[in-house]
Image: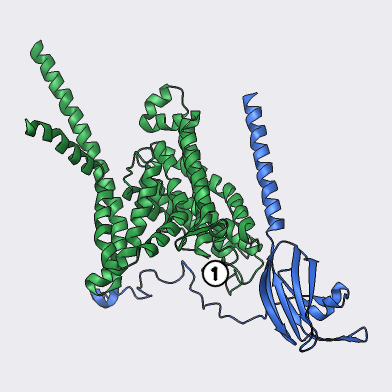
Amino acid sequence: MKSTRRIFVSLLLVLVLAGVAATMMVIGRGHTLYFDNKTLEDYQGQTYKAAHKVVVTVKGEDVAKLGARERGSAIWIGQNFKMTLEITQEKGGEPEIREISLKLPYSVDGIVINLPALLAGLPEEAWFSEFVPAVTEEDPGAEEIPGEGDEFGLGDDLGLESDLGTGDI
Amino acid sequence: MSRKNNSPAGKRVLELVRGNAVPIMFIIICAIFIPLSGFSPSYLINEIVTRMGRNLFLVLCLLFPIMAGMGLNFAMTLGAMAAEIAIIFTADWQIWGIPGVVLAMILSIPFSILLGWLCGNLLNMAKGREMITSYIMNFFITGWYQLVVLYMMGSIIPIIHSSIKLPRGYGIRNTVSLLNMRQCLDDLLAIRVKGVKIPVLTFLLIGLLCLFIVWFRRTKLGQDMRAVGQDMQVARDAGIKVERTRVLSIVMSTVFAGFGMVIYLQNIGNLPAYTGHSQIGMFCIAALLVGGASVEKATIGNAFLGVVLFHLMFIVAPAAGGVITGDSMVGEYFRVFLSYGVITLALIMYETKKRMAKSKAGQELAEAQAKEEAAQ
């Protein structure tokens, strides 16, 4: 009876921990968002012009002040992204403030958002793209790996032959 | 008359000094070094508070094996390795912030339990030589850790992000960035008092562990551990499962060391994948001993005092060394020398005390026998 109870409590504890871990995996997934204030040309025969200036505010913090053809970035934890955009379409114009909420895909690390397309209310395919970091060639031997090489600094030569004069034997 | 009154007081002071030689020595060193270093009090307090938040959890996890009479658990490094593996996965899955810390802690539990169970069983085979066995066990498991992290991760164990992988395509880089997790625990609920940042949440976690330790000592298992620590044979005769209790103490220490390592790494903000754990055991043990703990007795107070004194010395020694010798490296060497030296000193003092007690008991027994023979 006591051992059954113990097994039950242990299983319950494991389940609770697994549940908490699963929740953390969902709510803690980090994304890097890149905001492009770039003219979207020839989307279904139309062009969506970049605004003169866009200020992106995330969690009350100005993360980017973008002129035309500029890119800014912010990090976000979770899938329900919220931002405030202060858009000035023309130089000297009155800024317009828009609150935007987006559902971010779990599997994508870096997300590029084209702001003119998003503000024009176009479908996701028009304003959403995955950020693919540029591949830089790295020398595989550039990073020193533990366990490789000679920890004692002796190199290949242990110095026995020359030091002890055993070379002639 | 006055001599009669002074003598016990003098003896008491001498006893006090003898019993707290290491902390007193460190207080004197710090008292000399602090003015020499030239650091402002607010800077020192800030540094000490940061280091307390970073290290206290790790130091406190050493109390469980001491309670069970297994000495200083050099194998707490195993928990640190478990945490590092968990952190690598968390970083690769891009789980950031507090959820990342919580996930890393949960993920470290199975690894810590497995390693702690292995270590505990091994230490049961080496009773009386637990410290040296756990020390060597640490090197043994480091080899396995390197095999997993250096060769299996990325080849057998899936690792997605190339920013974590070595350029050759498998194995983990020497340093993994934890920038998106950096000080997330410390910053949440943090308050500033006269320029000193107090990481309230981290201290709450440390406080919870302290409360757990106090509560645990009063539980049946806690009492069993203390009984085993005092005398294994008596405990066994009293029906306590000695081996199981000892294994549990090591498992608990390893699991909490894993949690402590996650707290430590989130504070640092990067993971030195192959060297992060190597010095942890040594420094935590040194800090505990500096606080006045011994191989067979340690309290929460020892852990707090030890972290403050040890890290105060760590902060001021290079600058003071620079002032004294004109070379800050001398101070750097000095603090490394001191951290190892204090472990050696504490172990020598423990052994000397043990031998003195043994010889005193022998003398008393011989005297009693002589008296008995004379009476006959």
Q: Which chain is green?
A: B
Residue B272 can be seen, yes or no: no
Q: Nearer the viewer, residue B315 or B67?
A: B315
Query: Residue at image x 26%, y 44%?
Result: B20
Kindly identify which residue carries mark 1: B173
Please state which amino acid type lies under the numbered disc 1.
Arg
Q: Is residue B44 left or right of residue B4?
A: right
Q: Which chain is blue?
A: A
Measured as percent of width and height from the top left, residue B233 is found at 38, 26
Where residue B189 sits, quadrant-wise, is bottom right
Q: Tell me the SS state at disc 1.
A: loop
Chain under disc 1: B
Query: Residue at image x 43%, y 52%?
Result: B138
Measured as percent of width and height from the top left, residue A41 is found at 85, 87
Which residue sits furthest right? A45
Residue B9's place in the image compared with B309, above or below, is above
In what quadrant of the picture does the C terminus of chain B appear?
top left
Q: Nearer the viewer, residue B35 or B120?
A: B35
